[in-house]
Image (cartoon, grey):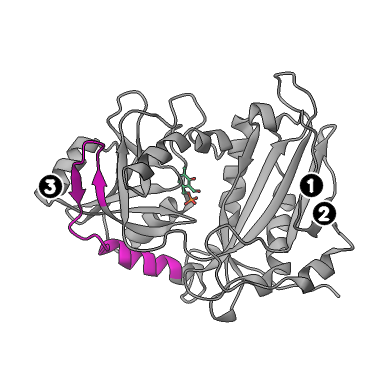
Amino acid sequence: MGQIVINKDLAKAISDFQLPENLGFGNVMAPVMASCSYENGKWGPLELLPYGPITMYPTAKVLHYAQEIFEGMKAYRVNGKGPFIFRPEENHLRFNRSAERMAMPHVPYNIFMQAVLDVTAYSSNFVPRRTGESLYLRPFMFASEESLGIKPAEKFKFMVIASPSGSYFSGAGLSVYIERENARAFPGGTGFAKTGGNYAAGLAAAITTKNLGFVQTLWLDAVHKKYIEEMSGMNVFVVINNELHTSTLGDTILDGITRKSLITLAQDLGYKVVERKIDVDEMLADIKSGKCTEAFACGTAAIITPINYFGEANGDRYPLHYPDGKVSTILREKLLAIQEGREQDPYKWVTVVEPKTLN
Ligand SMILES: Cc1ncc(COP(=O)(O)O)c(C=O)c1O
């Protein structure tokens, strides 16, 4: 890894930081962040500095034209072992796929990895240690160029921040609203990229979802409003006749690293996994007839969270036979045991981080 510039105030910021007892998800920020600027066609030095406000001009293109991408990943330190980061090279690859779609430069592997690993290494003491808890890592890049012209920026900032976090969902099973009006992504659009606009496009539906008493929104394809795509921050699996079914990827769905890992794990555990277009009304009929016994959401934040029921605006409800999961409980335990370093990692998915301190 290359040279890194360490800000003179970082040691104090780290020694002053105290991890609160109640974390929630994404609310508490670790005292370290990484930053690297792109200008004149190249990346400058990577800097580690105390977490805090950043300055930019009101004309920064990101504020007007949403040229922005991000990633979400986790470092685990259960029982004091680790920290372990799950498949960071996959996040790097996806980050650069998002960058291409949003007309942004690639972030080189060394800069991405060093930023993620060093933020984790210097935050080692702030990685919460109970199972299911972690340090949530958020790499992101935005157009910092100061100009209102609508054209691709030439100045960018890449940063990594981190949040000691508890579980994403609190309480029992997920209730999922089937969104039949709004669309999140469309063919030829940006659905497969992890860019802020996709999430903004889902927020109005998030209000409807909440007002109707649901926790999550299920998106259908924008063209036919018929096939299940994904949720606003996670992929979806359903269990039909003991087989795992999930939507085929395309340019409207995020290629989830949890989804990909679960396909491998499930197949190695002997489950048949089917990737196909899933017709939502067929799925609801399968739930009613008892063919579809469970469904679950998966993603870095959610890990694996069973779905309690699907529902519609007209009040119809489709409860799953196993609202707490059956197959999903087996998969969740297996995946989490690897992520937390409690079990052997035959896939070499886990990167071990050496904790670091400053004097
Ligand atoms: C829209 C969307 N789909 C799916 C996922 C799951 O992806 P991953 O498993 O890589 O976290 C996420 C979270 O990153 C997401 O934001």
SS for dot 1? strand
**Whether residue 2 is situated above or below residue 93 in the rendered picture:** below
Residue 36's tag is 1
Give the magenta part as a residue range.
309-336
Residue occupied by mark 2: 47
**Residue at the far left in the pictured view:** 289
Quarter-of-image position of residue 158: top right
- Can residue 81 be seen here? The reply is yes
- Other-residue count near label 3 (Cα within 10 Å), few / some / many at <14 / 14–19 / ≥20: some
Frontmost of labels 2 and 3 is 3
**Residue at the far front in the pictured view:** 211
User: CA separation, marks 2 and 3?
Assistant: 55 Å
Quarter of the rendering occupied by the N terminus: bottom right
- Can residue 1 be seen here? The reply is no
SS for dot 3? helix
Task: Please report whichever mark, 1 or 3, sits nearer to the chain's N-terminal start.
Answer: 1
Identify which amino acid the numbered label 2 is placed on.
Answer: Glu
**Residue at the far bottom in the pictured view:** 79
Residue 288's tag is 3
Q: Are marks 1 and 2 in contact (CB under 8 Å)?
A: yes
Closest to the observer: 210 or 72? Answer: 210
The answer as to whether callout 1 falls within 8 Å of ligand 1 is no
Measuring from the top left, give residue 341's x and y in whole percent. Answer: 52, 73
- Asked if residue 333 lies in the magenta stretch, the reply is yes
Identify which amino acid the numbered label 3 is placed on.
Answer: Lys
**Residue at the far right in the pictured view:** 8
SS for dot 2? strand
Q: Are marks 1 and 3 in contact (CB under 8 Å)?
A: no
Measuring from the top left, give residue 33's x and y in whole percent. Answer: 74, 57
